[in-house]
Amino acid sequence: MGKLYIVPTPIGNLDDMTIRAINVLKNVDVILAEDTRTSSKLLRHFEIQKKLFSHHKFNEHKTSEMIAERIEAGENVALISDAGTPGISDPGFLLVRTCVENGVEVETLPGATAFVPALVNSGLPCDKFCFEGFLPQKKGRQKRLKELAEEKRTMVFYESPYRLIKALEQFVEFFGAERNVSVSREISKIHEETVRGTIVQVLEHFKSAATVKGEIVIVLEGLNK
């Protein structure tokens, strides 16, 4: 029987790719990628020449069982996402669960993920925190925000740059203007930025910005009373 490897990839700076990750990708039989076009550039950079197949949120329900069967038959398979660790707000959970249920060995490599540096860099308590990932865009969003208004731990969210202003405006509404927040974007890239302050202060900063680019991590202070 083969093995499934979960392999994190850089979220920006290619120097964050580990030697172990490169070696695993060079030695497996097949690499599953969220977007083969994006991953092809990464693999070329590290001179990795392997079969590359698509595995994303639109086909993972159909392909997970088939992939598990291939591993059972002896193939070693690696799963990567466009950036960061597969399964963290990216495809991966269904495949891992299917392999576990079928007795297939899964090995997850440590590596890059956006929320850890953003959390530590925020200056907010990080001994206990809750990771929310992407909030629902429409249905259930306000209900979830209302529930989180009583959360005492530091909260971590992912957000699109196009929805950042709206998200911060909703945070003012549900958490209060004076709650502390840290917004990190372009982590590990040339234009990396972290903005800290009250929600209303950070909101004004991004409202005055010409454009907001890059993946966003919002770290929000928990209820302190």
Image (cartoon, grey):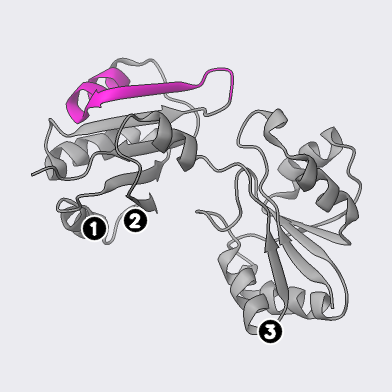
Query: Are the residues at dot 1 and dot 2 in contact (C-beta closer than 8 Å)?
Result: yes
Q: Residues within 10 Å of mark 2 (few under 14, many from 20)?
A: few
Q: Is residue 113 above or below residue 120?
A: below
Q: CA distance from mark 3 to mark 2?
A: 31 Å
User: Over which residues does the magenta segment extend?
Assistant: 189-207
User: Residue 154 in the image: x percent, y percent?
Assistant: 28, 44
**Quarter of the image that includes the C terminus:** top left
Front: mark 3 or 2: 3
Front: mark 3 or 1: 3
Nearer to us in this view, 129 or 52:
129
Q: Is residue 48 above or below residue 28?
A: above
Which numbered dot is residue 102? 3
Say left or right for 116 vs 5.
left
Say left or right for 169 vs 47.
left
Circle 2 residue = 136
Residue closest to the far left:
225
What amino acid is labelled 2 in the image?
Pro
Mark before the other along the chain sequence, 1 or 2:
2
SS at mark 1 in the image: helix
Residue pictured at 55% horizontal, 43% vertical: 113
What amino acid is labelled 3 in the image?
Asn
Residue pictured at 58% horizontal, 71% vertical: 94
Toward which corner of the image does residue 78 lie, by quadrant? bottom right
Q: Residues within 10 Å of mark 1 (few under 14, many from 20)?
A: few
Nearer to us in this view, 158 or 3:
3
Circle 1 residue = 144
